[in-house]
Amino acid sequence: MNTQPGSSLELDEIQGLVLNGYRHHTAARYVMFEIVDAARARAWLGSVVNHLQFGDYRKTPREQPPFIRDVCCNLAFTHPGFAALGLPTIALNGFSQPFQEGLADPNRARRLGDDGASDPTKWAWGGPGRPVHGLLAVFGMHCTPEGYAALKAVIDATLVEANGVRETAVLDTVPTDPVLRKEHFGFRDGITNPQIASLAQPGKGDIIADGEVLLGYENGYGHLPMAPHVPAETDRAGVLAPAVARPGFNDFGRNGSYLVFRQLQQDVRAFWEYVYKAKDAIPGLPAGREGAEWLASRLVGRWPNGTPITRYPERPGPDAEDKLNDFLYYETGDGFGARCPIGAHIRRTNPRDTTLPVPHDVELSGSPDDAEKRKAVLALTALHRIVRRGRMYGDPADPVYDLERLRQCDDKDRGLHFLCFNANLNRQFEFVQSNWAVNPTFAGLSRDPDPLLGARRTVPFPAADFTMPGGPGCPTRRVHDLPRVVEVRGGAYFFMPSRGALRYLAACGA
Ligand code: HEM
């Protein structure tokens, strides 16, 4: 078994992207493909597996081998993709239901808020009639024309019909500024990500069980996540571990993870036009850009430089603030959202110690400030974490966010390739998106969807308010008519298999 000291993870088996966002690999390209000849595709898999990046480099300090590659490649498949490769039906049926049904399933689309312009029938890829079988994600160190040419060369050498696979969509990314790290609306991104317990850095918090991300390890409930198994006799090369508590079966899912991929287009001008206008309805805000930034930062829950509103309610904290993720809400005295509104994007996608109504209400003895109670709430919200791996695409808009300049800004396609890993699509990504983000009645609100993701979604009902709860000496304030500023342009649920699972697939049908 290949582990890093103190880690029980089989690092040689886990694809690198699950464990690492490859931040130093600033160039990235995602290629969707279709399997057109199963036998050839399996043979291709057998050879390509040795060129993928696995987590083995994490076994040693950075300056010692094995090193991370200059070009990191990772592979993932959709449910139809595994079927096309000939994975036995019993294993196909062992994947979780959301994965089997796919991201574009009409009921799922309703629940996730993918309606109107975001309806899967309008997607550029991944929607009905636009099948995706697999994803090849390629990352390079150099964000230059030559760097991208090198990525293209890798892709062109492998995704060819002679290998039984055909490209169906190529999605590029743009690097974020290495210092400011801002997404298109102008806010610092990539701050918060939970750490997998076995790889957690000493002294850093925000830790989730390995099995919240990886199949084959204990999750936050102390159970093994549900996993697809194959009859042991089909594993002729003996590359898979025996399934736990299921004699005669081997574990195809172990060391793999579900990957959500959503292409989210951002309307930067609509976001800032709205904020500039809506701020005028709030008494006492400074005029111009300062007031607009104040309101926009409530919608996000952080100032543009990433400092959290709950700790810096009046003005941004210092740019050099190094504890950007080191806060709770209740503990900061912000239990009811007087500083960081309950409906802000970061508060509703990770409520931390915010007390939530049923099904998460925690009734413990003692005062509401009881530390035990906060711990219990945290333990519950920790069951809905995701590990984000997204990257921006499209030319950045004018970074000044001045209204007049933004009005002249072009309408080019720009946004976020939102990627996240989790071991349970239902309880993690889908719960966060539909129960927390899109839900206008989240945590006692009544008509307030996620201001970035959920405005005017038809399910459960169209809503477009944003409430900023008051506190002593300050009335509750509310803005209305939030526009839709993010639309889904494509997407799919993938599963990123282990090295052993890829080798098993390569030998399928042999
Ligand atoms: C274009 C769409 C989106 C934009 C512009 C956006 C923007 C941001 C920004 C600026 C942050 C704060 C920086 C950070 O904590 O890393 C953030 C945090 C976060 N976002 Fe998003 N986001 C988008 C989509 C989503 C989606 C679809 C989800 C999940 C359903 C999501 C979940 C989260 C989570 C979990 C956090 C961390 C919250 C925390 O732990 O404090 N985001 N996002």
Image (cartoon, rainbow, N blue to C red):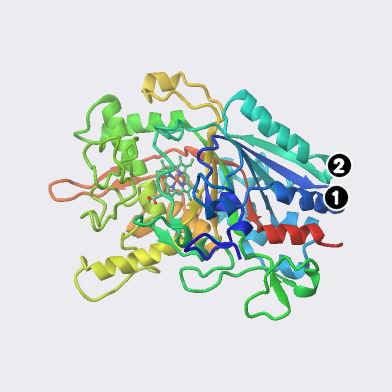
Q: Quadrant of the C terminus?
A: bottom right
The local secondary structure at tag 1 comes to helix
Going 45% across and 28% down the picture, which residue do you hit? 269
Location of residue 483 by image quarter: top left
The residue drawn where x is 39% and y is 29% is 273
Q: Earlier in the sequence, mark 2 or mark 1?
A: 1
Q: Which mark is residue 242?
A: none
SS class, disc 2: helix
Residue furthest front as drawn: 64
246 lies above or below 497: below
Q: Which mark is residue 40?
A: 1
Q: Are marks 2 and 1 in contact (CB under 8 Å)?
A: yes
Can you tell me whether the CB of the residue at mark 1 lies under 8 Å from the nearest atom of ligand 1? no
Within 10 angstroms of label 2, few (less than 14), some, or many (20 or more) residues? few
Spatial CA distance of label 2 from label 1 is 7 Å
Residue displayed at 60% across by 45% down = 119
Seen from the viewer's position, the closer of residues 9 and 353 is 9
Q: Determine if residue 479 is in view.
A: no
Q: Is residue 75 left or right of residue 87?
A: left
Residue 296 on image: x %, y %: 34, 36
CA neighbours of label 1 inside 10 A, class few (<14), some (14 to 19), many (20+): some
Residue designated by label 2: 162
Please determine whether, in this image, residue 491 is positioned above or below residue 247: above
Amino acid type at image mark 2: Ala
Kind of residue sitting beneath label 1: Arg
